[in-house]
Image (cartoon, rainbow, N blue to C red):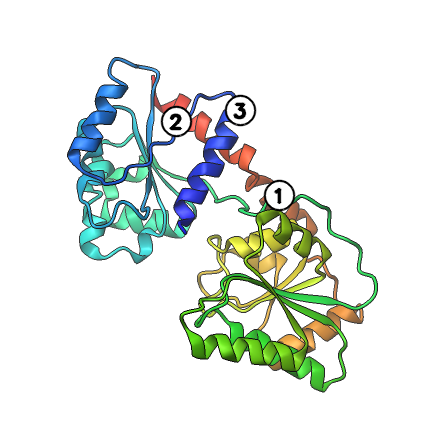
């Protein structure tokens, strides 16, 4: 239910694997009383750093995270999606901009935006990319038999679902026998959209793989050959589904916008419409263009997004910053 909680749990596991002692404090409510309880629990421990992952479901509208540098020593802050915070919520981080040991972001865009609001903080702003939230449990298989086209992500409105379904429709009209799968979860409360997805899947032979475990998702991605991920606002470093597909060796077709970093633009194929996507898939299937774009760039960037590499970078920052 909470992507930040998932990120925190995976980071904690990787830090433990690297030899650190890690405790994840899940607060039921972000009150000053709860924060003072944490302060008392670790009183006198000079070897402890405190790292806030913001936001999470339990934080709500609480202002208390912004005051942590005045209450706890050795504070680090990671801000997820600073770009979409309301202006008042952005201002909550005035004190962390002044007194946190470091403020961490997942991409340069958000770091630059924070620096525009709090220019005095520039030297303490760091970028550490997010990792793949679907561990690769099986190697990708060499293409054999029919192509396997997948969509992976939340199956709801404004996620490019219509684009994917229309692309498969174009391919069926052209006589394609490629297998098509949609991997994710349906928002069952939106009954009209659920009916549309299920009716389209039945009509076009799209297999719905719903509510799979991470292990089952990995197995399904390892069998895929091409992923079509038509994000309405473009692929970016925050798109865990794209990272998972790339890590599993799947050729990715997606939308490129001004938010798309250079490396993702180099390793994925851009598509702008269902007709464009169907044509691009045809070129890949017939060997007119390679399945893997910029393999050296892909290898480098995916290595930087390995959770153990991410943990080592966190430890380096902790050790470099805290004396």
Q: For numbered disc 1, what is the local secondary structure?
A: helix
Residue 211, x across and y down, in percent: 54, 58
Please report the residue visible at 23 percent of the width from the left and 23 percent of the height from the top.
39
Instruction: For the C terminus, give its image quadrant.
Output: top left
Please indicate whether residue 3 sits to the left or right of residue 218 in the image. left
Cα–Cα gap, marks 3 and 2: 14 Å
**Which residue lies under the disc numbered 1?**
300
Cα–Cα gap, marks 1 and 2: 31 Å
Please report the residue visible at 49 percent of the width from the left and 28 percent of the height from the top.
15
Q: Residues within 10 Å of mark 1 (few under 14, many from 20)?
A: few
Residue 11, x across and y down, in percent: 47, 35
Q: Which callout, 3 or 2, points at the residue further toward the start of the chain?
A: 3
**Which residue lies under the disc numbered 2?**
23
User: Could you tell me if the residues under marks 3 and 2 are in contact, i.e. CB atoms within 8 Å?
Assistant: no
**Which residue lies under the disc numbered 3?**
18
Residue at the bottom extreme?
Answer: 173
Q: Which callout, 1 or 2, points at the residue further toward the start of the chain?
A: 2
Residue 312 in view of the camera: no
Residue 101 versus residue 249 in the image, above or below:
above
Residue 245, x across and y down, in percent: 62, 55
The nearer-to-camera label among 1 and 3 is 3
Q: Residues within 10 Å of mark 2 (few under 14, many from 20)?
A: few
């Amino acid at each position: 239910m909470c992507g930040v909680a998932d990120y925190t749990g995976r980071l904690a596991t990787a830090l433990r694997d690297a030899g650190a002692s890690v405790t994840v404090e899940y607060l039921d409510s972000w009150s000053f009383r709860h924060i003072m309880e944490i302060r008392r629990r670790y009183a006198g421990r000079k070897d402890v750093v405190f790292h806030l992952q913001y936001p999470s479901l339990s934080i709500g509208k609480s202002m208390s995270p912004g005051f942590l540098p005045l209450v706890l020593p050795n504070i680090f802050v990671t801000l997820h999606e600073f770009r979409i915070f309301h202006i008042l919520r952005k201002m909550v981080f005035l004190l962390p901009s002044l007194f946190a040991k470091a403020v961490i972001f997942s991409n340069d865009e958000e770091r630059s935006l924070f620096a525009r609001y709090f220019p005095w903080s520039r030297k303490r702003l760091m970028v550490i990319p997010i990792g793949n939230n679907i561990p690769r449990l099986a190697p990708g298989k060499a293409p054999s038999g029919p192509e396997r086209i997948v969509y992976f992500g939340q199956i709801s409105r404004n996620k490019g679902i219509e684009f994917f379904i229309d692309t498969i429709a174009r391919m069926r009209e052209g006589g394609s026998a490629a297998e098509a799968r949609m991997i994710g979860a349906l928002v069952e409360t939106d009954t009209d959209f659920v009916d549309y997805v299920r009716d389209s899947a039945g009509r076009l032979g799209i297999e719905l793989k719903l509510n799979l475990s991470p292990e089952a998702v990995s197995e399904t991605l390892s069998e895929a050959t091409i992923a079509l991920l038509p994000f309405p606002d473009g692929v970016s470093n925050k798109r865990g589904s794209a990272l998972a597909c790339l890590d599993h060796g799947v050729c990715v077709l997606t939308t490129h916008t001004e938010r798309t970093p250079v490396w993702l633009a180099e390793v994925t194929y851009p598509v702008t419409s269902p007709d464009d996507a169907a044509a691009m898939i045809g070129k890949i299937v017939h060997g007119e263009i390679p399945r893997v774009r910029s393999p050296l760039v892909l290898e480098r960037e995916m290595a930087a997004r390995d959770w153990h590499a991410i943990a080592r970078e966190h430890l380096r920052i902790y050790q470099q910053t805290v004396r």
